[in-house]
Image (cartoon, rainbow, N blue to C red):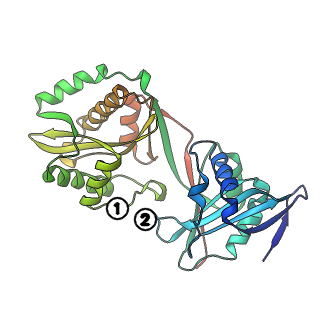
Amino acid sequence: MTDSQHSPTHTPFTLRPFQNRDAEAVAQLVTDGVHGHWVYSAEQFLEERQPDRLRWVAVQDERVVATARLAPFGSGSPDALRLDLAGDSAAFGALYLALLGRLPAGFSQLLGVTREDWPETMGFFAAAGFRNAWQSWGAHLNLSDFEFAPYQPLEERLFLDGYEVERLMKDAADPDWAALHALYQQGSADAPRNPTTTPDALNMAELRDMVRREEVAFVVRWRGQVVASTRFTPHGAEVETEHTVTHAAHRSRGLATLVKAHALAWAKAEGFSHAGTGGTVLNLPMLRVNSRLGYVPEAMWITWERGLGV
């Protein structure tokens, strides 16, 4: 079935479901839509169609000029579908209406995520009646400017109290992985989150496998026990913080700052050029930690919400 819609300048768009031959064009549109924040390949869009996922495209003069996708948001909001749009914003309204007529069952709300300095999607969600429901922050640190020396007095003071920082090696003993997982669970339960900043839950084996396969972890020990941790994932020339947490009985001593400073010093020594991090604006303790470490905040990420009236 073919639908068409006219933009405010009376330029026709033909709307249809995504086909595999659209993958290269869609990859470029989505990369441009996130302003190069991530780079997508055609392979990521091939055969992505599933019963609970929809992607449509807008075609003009036989060229794909815009795309929209609905897919389950994930564990952060299991009753929500996520709406993503990219390309010519004049086609967003028509694509949105096409998807609304084909919603999969079992979902009660739509969520959209964009940055406050991306006017195309910000303007669409505001005009389409979505609510600016949650805000998240991102920040980057130029590692060439990072020096560990300012944190040495903190390290010396904490050392006298029995705290020591080390990298958690991939062959660590099972009790260390159990302690790391317990910290992960505590941090997940305690830290303020919103749908965008809620990670998938991991059991101990999954967490251990992820750290061994993809991440680098640093921990703080107190009398041999793991009481704080931070995990980084390398991406090209950048490292991204996955999770930083301190045991409740050891908070307000500077352990999160110290363990993350050690991880940043390691990343710089390994030749990484930048470090990235982020989280909900409600997580004030971590905002303070990252400010002390020299991270520079970026434009906020906005999660828009609209109920489906079911």
Residue type pointed to by label 2:
Ser
The quarter of the displayed image where residue 86 is located: bottom right
Disc 1 target residue: 201
The quarter of the displayed image where residue 225 is located: top left
User: Can you say which quadrant of the picture contains the C terminus?
Assistant: bottom right
Sequence-first disc among 2 and 1: 2
Q: Is residue 136 above or below residue 72?
A: above
Q: Position of residue 61 (x, y in %)?
A: 86, 58
Residue type pointed to by label 1:
Ala
Q: Residue furthest right?
A: 10
Left-right relation of 52 to 182:
right
Disc 2 target residue: 75
Q: Residue furthest top?
A: 149
Left-right relation of 36 to 190:
right
The quarter of the displayed image where residue 228 is located: top left
Q: Position of residue 200 (x, y in %)?
A: 39, 60
Q: Is residue 73 above or below residue 9?
A: below
Left-right relation of 279 to 59:
left
- At a point 39% along the width and 27% down the height, the residue shown is 271
- At a point 78% along the width and 59% down the height, the residue shown is 91
For residue 169, the mark is none
Within 10 Å of the Cα at label 1, are there few (<14), some (14-19), or many (20+) other Cα atoms? few
Whether tag 2 and tag 1 are in contact, CB under 8 A, the answer is yes
Name the residue nearer the viewer: 165 or 123. Answer: 165
